[in-house]
Image (cartoon, grey):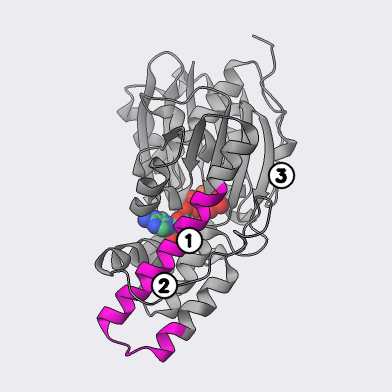
Amino acid sequence: MKVLGIESSCDETGVAIYDTEKGLLSERLYSQVAMHAEYGGVVPELASRDHIRKIVPLIRESVAEAGLKMSDLDGIAYTSGPGLIGALMVGASVGRTMAWSLDIPAVAVHHMEGHLLAPMLEDDAPEFPFVALLVSGGHTMLVEVKAIGEYKILGESLDDAVGEAFDKTAKLLGLSYPGGPELAALAEKGKPSEIKFPKPMVNRPGLDFSFSGLKTSALQTWTKSSQTDEAKADIAYAFQEAVVETLAIKCDRALKQTGYKRLVVAGGVGANKRLRERLAELQGTVFFPRQAYCTDNGAMIAYAGALRLNAGESEAAVISPQPRWSLESLSGLSQAV
Ligand code: ATP
Ligand code: MG
Ligand code: FE
């Protein structure tokens, strides 16, 4: 079954074709990051308009690269939430309309299920069950994953998501947009110093997180520092260490609590080198997607959708994108096939 996946929940237009027999056939990604950089953050209305400009050409290219015609597609998967409503509407309208005109089934994919299943596109795909750490621009969650669609949230951030904490702290330190990767690169130049940041909520039981205080600590430390490049790098280092250590402590706790032996890490912050190194030290086996599949992409949506379409799921010819959509409300794969 050849499935076209469409991702447009935020500022990346991603399309890909996944074949349930041959794997990934082609993919295209367009990032709007340069456009939003001028404003220091994603401007929703501009994001929607740019998705409209890019989505059809990207689909055409992806279909051609796969050596297919539109009529060879067997199904369409599009991100239906969570995300920016206008941006979601673009992918959902195009995807659902294409499916209707080609007379093939379509499924609405949960963006975080896409992130969560991305490691399965790799050769060393994890087996179920596992604990998933989802760390992205909008989410920080520990999820108990029994099977596809069987998700229980063990803990989540009570305020800022980890990616958001990286981005906001980077902005406060005067780094250019998008800040997360910049801050991580600067941290690599820093060294251990007397600067220590709190590890939020590690001394409390449970698996929830809180990252909003860290940016304030970073700003205060920066204001009081010598404000040299060296001081900035050391602050970045201390910030990253505090975040990584907090995540590692909670992942370890989640593995012990569930008794599971596998940890899957996904979402944009999963691209962070120091986080990958530190989590690899935990008891159990850790699975990461390649860096390009940590951040938003069409491949993860094509894959998640292909699993559901292949199990016989499909949606009526309407769209109802959901800016907020609970991961726990999903259901397991139907046994239709
Ligand atoms: P969500 O998936 O929650 O809807 P999103 O799609 O915007 O949010 P992703 O594309 O998964 O998020 O990830 C983007 C986030 O990852 C940004 O906050 C970015 O700063 C962060 N990020 C990317 N690379 C790194 C890195 N190397 N270190 C730290 N953070 C990073
Ligand atoms: Mg993005
Ligand atoms: Fe995402």
Q: Position of residue 308 (x, y in %)?
A: 61, 23
Residue at left offset 46%, top offset 36%: 283
Question: Where 263 falls versus 41 (above or below)?
Answer: above
Q: Per the image, is 223 magenta?
A: yes
Q: Which mark is residue 170?
A: 2
Residue at left offset 32%, top offset 90%: 226
Q: Per the image, is 312 magenta?
A: no
Q: Is residue 128 left or right of residue 272?
A: right
Ligand 1 has an atom within 8 Å of the beta carbon of the residue at disc 2: yes
Q: Mark 3 or mark 2, which is nearer the start of the sequence?
A: 2
- The residue singled out by tag 3 in the image is 326
Amino acid at dot 3: Ser
- The residue singled out by tag 1 in the image is 243
Q: Is residue 199 left or right of residue 120?
A: right
Q: Is residue 27 visible?
A: yes
Q: Position of residue 186 (x, y in %)?
A: 30, 68
Question: In this picture, which residue range is highlighted in magenta?
Answer: 221-250
Circle 3 — which element? loop
Q: Nearer the viewer, residue 198 or 146?
A: 198
Q: Which mark is residue 131?
A: none
Q: Nearer the viewer, mark 2 or mark 1?
A: 1
- Mark 2–mark 1 contact, CB under 8 Å? no
Q: Is residue 92 left or right of residue 62?
A: right
Amino acid at dot 2: Ala
Q: Nearer the viewer, residue 229 or 138?
A: 229
Q: Nearer the viewer, mark 1 or mark 3?
A: 1
Q: CA distance from mark 2 to mark 3?
A: 29 Å
